[in-house]
Image: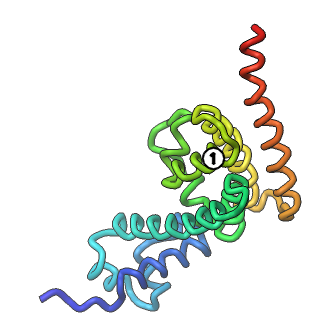
Amino acid sequence: MPPKAKFTRDEIVQAGLNVIRKNGMEALSARTLGAQLGSSARPIFTVFQSMEEVQAEIKKSARFLYDEYVRKGLEQELAFKGVGMQYIRFAIQEPKLFQMLFMSEQKQNPAVVNVMPMIDDNYSDILLSVQNGYQLPEHKAEQLYRHLWIYTHGIAVLCATNMCIFTAEEINRLIEQAFKGILKEIMQEDTKNEAE
């Protein structure tokens, strides 16, 4: 008969999230996780088969937390802007989780057009918010989304790494200015193409 689990899967995952929140993903080990739980590492492996399995569950839980931020953004009147603001808010409030999810080196080198669907399960919902919110065809919505994600990701990285501090008003103004400029350029492309 296998030994009775001292901790639940959720307790172990929450402890892992706390380790990462304090010291980053590189600090997560069986020993630090056991210490966070006030135990040795042994009870972890009555619930999980390996540290890789623990890490996968922790990442899944961090993604769930991030998804809550996106959901709040999508509920706002200007949903696309709301998502951008929430993306940055997640980076500010959960910097180590943001770094783990969005600043990790990729195994492959994806093209920029493929990276967003690869790293964000909310891609389709966000793209739809761009199409519906601004009455854009899919290809223009993708273009706008891609440009704004690059810009927003830059602000989020600066915040998550303590390189810069922005007020909510500054973030709002920066995103609005970038959005207006990029949208104008995208909409003028058709006129430029017709003139040529």
Residue 45 visible to the viewer: yes
Q: Residue, x 49% and y 85% (percent of image)?
A: 36
Q: Residue furthest toward the left?
A: 1
Q: Residue, x 76% and y 62% (percent of image)?
A: 162
Instruction: Residue 63 in the image: state x and y as whole percent.
Output: 50, 64
Count of all numbered marks drawn on residues in the image: 1
What colour scheme has been applied to the protein in the rendered image?
A: rainbow
Q: What residue is shown with label 1?
A: 132
* Image quadrant where one finds the C terminus: top right
Q: Is residue 185 left or right of residue 105?
A: right
Q: Secondary structure at mark 1?
A: helix
* Image quadrant where one finds the N terminus: bottom left
Instruction: Residue 46 in the image: state x and y as whole percent.
Output: 26, 82
Q: Is residue 163 left or right of residue 110?
A: right
Q: Within 10 Å of the Cα at label 1, are there few (<14), some (14-19), or many (20+) other Cα atoms?
A: some
Please name the amino acid that badge 1 sits on.
Asn
Q: Residue, x 63% and y 60% (percent of image)?
A: 74
Q: Residue, x 60% and y 59% (percent of image)?
A: 99
Instruction: Residue 179 in the image: state x and y as whole percent.
Output: 78, 43
Q: Determine which quarter of the picture holds residue 157.
A: bottom right
As drawn, 162 above or below 8? above
Residue 112 visible to the viewer: no
Question: Which one is nearer the viewer's eye here, 181 or 32?
Answer: 181
Q: Is residue 102 left or right of residue 106?
A: right
Q: Determine which quarter of the picture holds residue 18.
A: bottom right
